[in-house]
Amino acid sequence: MRSTSTDPLLSVESLRTEFRTEGGTVTAVNDVSFALEQGEVMGLVGESGAGKSVTATSILRLIPYPGEIVSGAVTFDGEDLLERTEKEMQGIRGNRITLIPQDPMTSLNPVLTVGRQIIETIRLHQDVDKAEAREIAIESMREVEIPDPQSRIDEYPHEFSGGMRQRVLIAIGLACEPDLIIADEPTTALDVTTQAKILELLNDLRERRGVSILMITHNLGVVAQTCDRVGVMYAGNLIETGRVEDVFEQPRHPYTRALIDSIPSVDDDLERLYSLPGSMPDPKALPDGCNFADRCAHATEECRAGPDPALEAVSNRSTDSQVACLRAADLDLSEPARNGTDERRQRTTTTESLLEVNGLKKHFSAGDGFFGNLSLTRTDGGGLSLERRYVKAVDGVSFTINRGETLGLVGESGCGKSTVARTVMQLLEPTDGEVYFDGHPLHELGSSEMRSLRQEMQIIFQDPKSSLNPRKTVGQIIGRGMKKHGIATGDEKRSRIEELLERVGLQAGDIDKYPHQFSGGQQQRIAIANALAVEPKLIVCDEPVSALDVSVQAQILNLLADIQDEFDLSYLFISHNISVVRHICDRVAVMYLGKVAELGPTERVFSPPYHPYTESLLSAVPHSTPDRQPDRILLEGTVPSPIDPPTGCSFHTRCPKKLDGTCEREEPGLDPIDGDGTHQISCHLSVDEMGEPRTETGEPRADP
Amino acid sequence: MTEEKKAHYGRFLRQFRRNQKAMIGLLIILGLVLTALFAPVIAPHDPEATNIPDRELAPSLEHPMGTDDLGRDILSRVMFGTQISLYVGFTSISAAMIMGTTIGVVAGYYQGKIDEGLMRAMDAMMSFPPILLALTIVAVLEPSLNNVIIALALVYTPFIARVARSAALSVRNESYVEAAIARGESDRYIIFREVLPNCVGPLLVQASINIAFTMLLEASLSFLGLGVQPPTPSWGLMINQGWAFMGDAPWLVFFPALAIAIAVIGFNLLGDGLRDVLDPKGEIIE
Amino acid sequence: MAFASYLVKRLGFMAVTLFLVTLITFGLTNVLPGNVALLILGPNATEESLAQLETQLGLNQPLYVQYVDWIVGLARGDMGMSLRYNTPVAEQIAIRLPRSLLLAISATIVSVTLSIPLGIIAAVRKNTPADLTASMLAFIGLSLPIFLWGLVFIFVFALNLGAFPTRGYVSPAEDPIAALHYLILPAGAMGVALTAYIMRMTRSSMIDELSEDYVEFARAKGLSEQTVVLRHALKNAAIPVITVIAFQFSYAFGGVVVLEEVFSWPGIGRLTLTAIENRDIPLLQGCIIVIALIYMVSNFLADAFYAYVDPRIRYGGEK
């Protein structure tokens, strides 16, 4: 255990970590200094490539080849870790400093039971026998609220859901009663409702155990909900630190301000986002002076020369914030930044429908090939039988999209939202149901008719890198659709492509470049230009900003909003991110397990009365305002398998407002709940009951 | 080539040039190709001219690799043997590439029943050890150079089909293929313009390594007397004929064996190096 | 139940493959040029006796009838009569197969004991002289045809050192010591030839596993490098390696065709060559089918084994 002293538990001084790659030396962590007190939770936040994860692995001295800690000191409980031998470090890792890794799906060894993986850590660091270690392991599983730990300890990782695996990882981290936990993006791979539960657990543990946590995350909401202090990183530098309330209320660095303003809030709709131009500089070719200067609205000549600005205390008695900005003293960044107009978008939508979907179903064979979906099961009589099994990814979905309108499709992973998109576009053949596009029954069309109709409906994908053929130039990619559908050829085609590129914020000269020469955000711009090239009426946006950093995400969302107004487009906008959906959609459909739970105008869906699932989704979003008390509804259990969906209402297994009997037996219809019939909810509860706030505890209510 | 194209392929060429395995492999293959092309010019003797009094001569200045049991100059025979080896390797793998790529890409693109049927057939062909299948095919068709090529092409088709299928399958999952379908492209266009060009990397690697395998197999067939027929100077055949004299005149076996090893190493090195450059994590089926 | 489902599925695959294998075998052997009846009776046979024999052998029946007859026979273990030996094919194979199995199993044992440790060392010491040496040796190993390894072994150990006989076979039942003496060179030669593949596979699959997140996490738990490699990475890396070993074992049956010729080892490989030389179709069909069956069975066993090792298959798929 830790010796008592007044020094900070962990202090990192001028840490510098470099990677020597073929293309040159990358300074991933550049003179980073910070301190973490006993019992404190500190967040390290930044976009991808900022150096936050490398900082964490440097503390544990687990930098992979060809990385190397070049200089600095990491003082943990009075000892410099960089001076310790590898053997001594092994005694510290997993014992006094533990790591909660990012991806629960890949961080557990698939061929060892979870028990073995917890117990090996305990026996390594504590002098206990097997039986005692097992007891400790069960105890830590209980502490992280894994139900039935005595029997689950002997199960393999694949028998646990993602959230439960993350709990196992936390149990491993806790088992040896560490002084410091480094949590490296502990909820990034999880759905929002699961994330809410894990964050709740971490907050509890921290209160109970008084353990210090270094929280690495790209999500400012997570920081706001869990941390005492925060450090903001950019291109290897720590550019601002301070108490969470201070940093959110009065950021001192223009980048911090921009980061906060780029996030769409779950409360605002249709507001234009602040967007930071450009993207993070190439780590192999960092500019002179402040690395942020090129994107900064306040940069002067002075900022662009000399070394990186040093992290210095703000000359103000009321905070202990530190900032690395030459102009920190001159700037007042307490008001949100704006670029251009800050008005809400004025939306005018027609009531003329463009796309109409009725009772759409898509069932997949569970497993590949002829034998793949066979499953041997025991029949009631005790005999064996072979059954074919199907995943009911989309199981009866209906909605319409009007001309010029954006319909959002929101839900957690596996709810079937992307399958809806692909089935609507006839990229997948629907199992059942009707799809009318501009009056044409797509489900009845032959392949050649369908092909010519495809010009009018386009799709933008999540991963921009994957959506552009790496062997074609930007011009070839965008030009192909124009040629194919007879829109333009020759010189006219070329000038149109150049116009389009400029329209989406690229340069005409980019036409002959290959996709790999662009950043992720730029690639998504190319994908948008490609979709626009054939002059479609409908664009399906399948998680178009999920793979992008927040500052780039804001640019793309603004672009999508602008071109919608300009070209009178309709969008089917698919996202797991409620804030993004709320920001851009006119109407929204909430999906759960292949069905629509709630459908209606955005502002009505996201305010009472709610479907209980919508309500829990909304409450689970971590707000990026630290003073807002989280009042989360934590759903029990996990999403059931779409192979065997529950009877009755598919949400009844997890619903905090479940009515015993009815909900298990009868499937509710998607019924209108307001006068004009635009807001529909699929729930047995009365409108009043759906509007009621939950009971204080968040526990399921007693029977009505 | 435009500037942009150069920039596009430049990275590949730079890495290729920096990869020692690939460069050594390429040099060896270049040497083999030159030897094969100029064998009639540079070979010191007629490879088929027998000279019984000069038989089984040890290596000397006149015969750097010695002479065989019929007094033929081994160096000249090894040089002409290069022609046979390369001819067999290139032609049979070209044929196997055409068949295997077609089958594999079609299976990987269409998936489902077509995939299942084609791949089961490939599995069945791969259930026979390559040499057994090749032997049987050659025996059915009568041993000859062309029949060896036909047999090898058939034997290696499933190996290439498997690689082509897995490459096509992963390209099929890329969004740009979905985008092409969404644009209304025909299957033909998608297969040839979107999928195939992006499968070239793993296929090149597999082709290079399979040429090495065909050379080994051709040597084995000839060694068993079921490949190229005498008096054509094939390396495997030379070993077959020299084997009986190994105790007294090991050079009869040594030099053709060395030639086989060098040629096979050359193609294996190129394949390995290409794989390092194109896909550092990719696997091949061996 | 998931494990049983998995095995049932694999058996289903195997049945389909087996059906295709019999089709290929039958198809190939029935385009063999040469009139079988003529082969048996010799060039002086009369038209009449030829026709009579053809009827007797069923050669005048349509091909599909012949195929069905052959399959039905196979299912009963009847592979017909060998034209060369004039005894049942099944009997010939029953005598020869165990000898080849002895050779192939010994060779597999040699190669596995050599290749797995080498592969692990090469992966853990990636890009060091130890790795480069091991990888280079493996490279040379797979660049020589298998018969050349036989010749090299004969040249070095038999002709020059005189330590072992150059060729021949003694049954272990008769004289175990002498049998071993005769076995060492062919098994060693084949073992070395197979080592290269398994070593390369072990190395690359180990390198893949060592870059996985759970390995990184195991290190973060404070485990020593040895524990990380042997307890965590190896068990996962073994899964693809088992497939390669099974493949190599059956591949060894290709090797025996050549190597048995080199060492005059009277196994199923030489039997196959004899059948080809004598155009003994029933015998050839029998040999090919048996060798293909060995491939399928060893692959099935490998699948079953690794399904057992891998809990994701044993207890059902990912959730």
Image: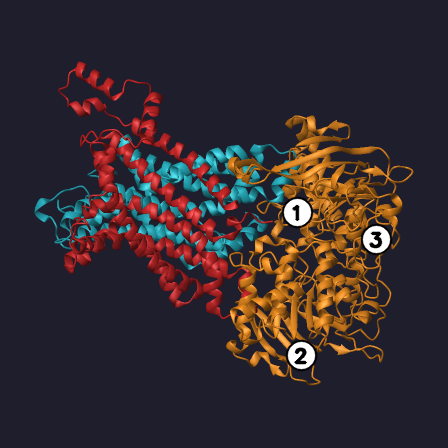
Chain colours: A orange, B cyan, C red
Q: Which residue is mark 1?
A: A511
**Disc sitting over residue A11 in the figure:** 2
Q: Chain of mark 3?
A: A
Which image quarter: residue A30? bottom right
Q: What is the distance, in whole Å, between disc 3 and disc 1 at their CAs?
A: 29 Å
Which image quarter: residue A27? bottom right
Give SS at disc 1.
helix
Q: Nearer the viewer, residue A576 or C178?
A: C178
Residue B12 percent location from the top left of the image? 51, 53
Q: What is the distance, in whole Å, between disc 1 and disc 2 at their CAs?
A: 50 Å
Q: Is residue C308 left or right of residue A528?
A: left
Which is more N-terminal, label 3 or label 2? 2
**Disc sitting over residue A15 in the figure:** none
Q: What is the distance, in whole Å, between disc 2 and disc 3 at their CAs?
A: 40 Å
Residue type of the residue flagged with mark 1: Ile
Residue type of the residue flagged with mark 3: Arg
